[in-house]
């Protein structure tokens, strides 16, 4: 029997990497229902957010299949104003898509996430932080490795489902880097 009925995860997944996968796998092991929200869902074709919501959803579904549900969440602000209002917006979005309040929120252990919620909003929700030191990688570094075609290193940090799309990932990033896609 799993500890939680439903757990949620929110990330940009630009692209999905093994650090993200470790968080999602922890949720799968502890939750009957795992719901992944793709943040900044409206953003794409920029250096920070190169991939569309649908491309990122494909990365996730190729890796985890029906073990997870995937939904978009658009930004509430420009990202510089992360605060309890964002947390309320996130929890409302979770409820709108799932009809439930989460029992657990799984996340990489980043200090900014401490500011995501008002205490009263998460009083009955467990916050599960998965240490980033276990897999010390960032999507920014992954994007740079792809641009430099350092596939031997990339293979170590991304799941096979993303690595198998390495040429597609490279061409999206290269087009943005060369300005072939408007930022």
Image: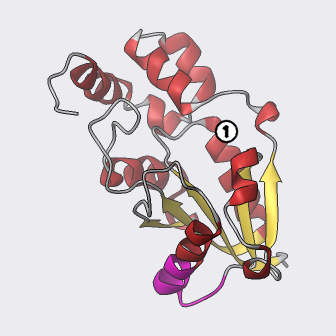
Task: Tell me the residue at 49%/50% (across/down).
Answer: 79
Task: Tell me the residue at 46%/17% (across/down).
Answer: 144
User: How many badges with numbers are in the image?
Assistant: 1
Residue 28: name its quadrant: bottom right
Task: Tell me the residue at 48%/52% (across/down).
Answer: 60
Give the main secondary structure of the magenta stretch: helix
The residue lying toward the viewer, choosing from 28 and 49, is: 49
Instruction: Assign the C terminus to one quadrant of the image.
Output: top left
Instruction: Assign the N terminus to one quadrant of the image.
Output: bottom right
Residue that numbered label 1 is attached to: 19
The spot of residue 113 in percent (x, y) is 70, 54
Q: Secondary structure at mark 1?
A: helix
Task: Tell me the residue at 14%/23% (across/down).
Answer: 180
The spot of residue 78 in percent (x, y) is 42, 51
The spot of residue 171 in percent (x, y) is 26, 23
Is residue 95 on the magenta stretch? yes
The residue lying toward the viewer, choosing from 47 and 54, is: 47
Q: Is residue 49 left or right of residue 80?
A: left
Q: Is residue 121 above or below residue 106?
A: below
Provide the residue span drawn in magenta. Answer: 92-101
Q: Work out which residue is located at the far front of the displayed protein and give it.
A: 81
The spot of residue 23 in percent (x, y) is 70, 51
How many C-alpha atoms fall within 10 Å of the one at disc 1: few (<14), some, or many (≥20)? many
The residue lying toward the viewer, choosing from 42 and 142, is: 42
Is residue 46 on the magenta stretch? no
Q: Is residue 115 above or below residue 162?
A: below
Q: Is residue 11 left or right of residue 166?
A: right
């Amino acid at each position: 029997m799993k500890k939680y009925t439903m757990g949620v995860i929110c990330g940009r997944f630009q692209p999905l990497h093994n650090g993200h996968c470790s968080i999602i796998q922890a949720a799968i092991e502890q939750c009957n229902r795992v719901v992944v929200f793709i943040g900044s869902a409206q953003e794409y074709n920029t250096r920070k957010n190169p991939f569309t919501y649908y491309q990122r959803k494909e990365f996730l579904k190729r890796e985890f299949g029906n073990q997870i549900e995937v939904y978009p969440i658009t930004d509430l602000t420009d990202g510089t104003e992360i605060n309890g209002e964002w947390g309320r917006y996130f929890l409302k979005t979770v409820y709108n898509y799932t009809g439930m309040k989460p029992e657990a929120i799984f996340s990489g252990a980043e200090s900014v996430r401490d500011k995501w919620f008002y205490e009263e909003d998460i009083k009955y929700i467990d916050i599960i932080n998965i240490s980033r030191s276990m897999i010390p990688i960032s999507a920014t570094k992954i994007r740079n490795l792809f641009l430099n075609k350092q596939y031997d290193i990339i293979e170590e940090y991304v799941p096979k489902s993303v690595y198998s799309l390495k040429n597609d990932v490279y061409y999206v990033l290269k087009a943005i880097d060369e300005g072939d896609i408007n930022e």
